[in-house]
Amino acid sequence: AQSVTQLDSQVPVFEEAPVELRCNYSSSVSVYLFWYVQYPNQGLQLLLKYLSGSTLVESINGFEAEFNKSQTSFHLRKPSVHISDTAEYFCAVSDPGTASKLTFGTGTRLQVTL
Amino acid sequence: NAGVTQTPKFQVLKTGQSMTLQCAQDMNHEYMSWYRQDPGMGLRLIHYSVGAGITDQGEVPNGYNVSRSTTEDFPLRLLSAAPSQTSVYFCASSYRDNEQFFGPGTRLTVL
């Protein structure tokens, strides 16, 4: 069975500072990887995804994540955060061909302050 | 498009009561799923469907039933509510092997 580990439950950071949210997964087969963001009292929104191809994927709002197969990681990074990035971030994994069956990590709460 | 819609937004039940959480999508997605979100546990898959008439169990299916009679709708039924089912429930849909789109959630409290 797959599992996803998000080691940091909370990450406090000052505005304009860089941030990295860590995600490790355990799977013996090929995987699809996702980062979702959840703003307070809302549903989840896709931030970025890795299905195949380039191991570095980017979002439209400046986040990026790199798929590292040897380290089974998919860490999320942003070089300069904004107050509006304050949210909960979830890493998720699925087997190729089973996009309806996501396994989620426990989430990381990113708190951006002035 | 409305995307994925869920009703109700909030619900309070007494132990032993039954109810149905509604989920609908207007994107003609084949795949639909139900998750529950609990503090410190992320989201866990309850049931999923890969098309009308086809459903299967996820990680935490006990106490829940689903059916998929149409492509658009995927209701989740609680047969006899228990306090352990207090949670936020999210429905999601996807087109084949791609990312899932989530609804706004239903916050359920079982007393």
Image (cartoon, coloured by chain):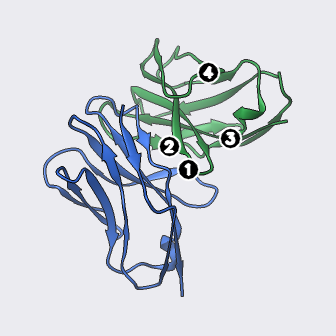
**Residue at x-position 40% and y-position 30%:** B29
Residue A25 location in percent, x, y? 32, 46
On what subunit does the disc labeled 3 rest? B
Q: On what subunit does the disc labeled 4 rest? A: B
Direction from residue B32 to residue B75 in the image, left or right: right
Distance in Å between CA atoms under marks 3 and 2: 16 Å
Q: What numbered label is drawn on residue A43?
A: 1
Give the CA separation, mark 3 to mark 1: 14 Å
Q: Secondary structure at mark 3?
A: strand
- Of mark 3 and mark 2, the one earlier in the sequence is 3
Please determine whether, in this image, residue B73 is positioned above or below residue B36.
Answer: above
Report helix, strand or loop for mark 4.
loop
Chain letter for the green colouring in the rendering: B
Horizontal placement of B88 versus B28: left or right?
Answer: right
Q: Indicate the amino acid at tag 3.
A: Ser
The chain displayed blue equals A
- Asked if the residues shown at circle 1 and circle 2 are in contact, with their CB atoms under 8 angstroms apart, the answer is yes
Query: Relative to B74, is A46 above or below?
Result: below
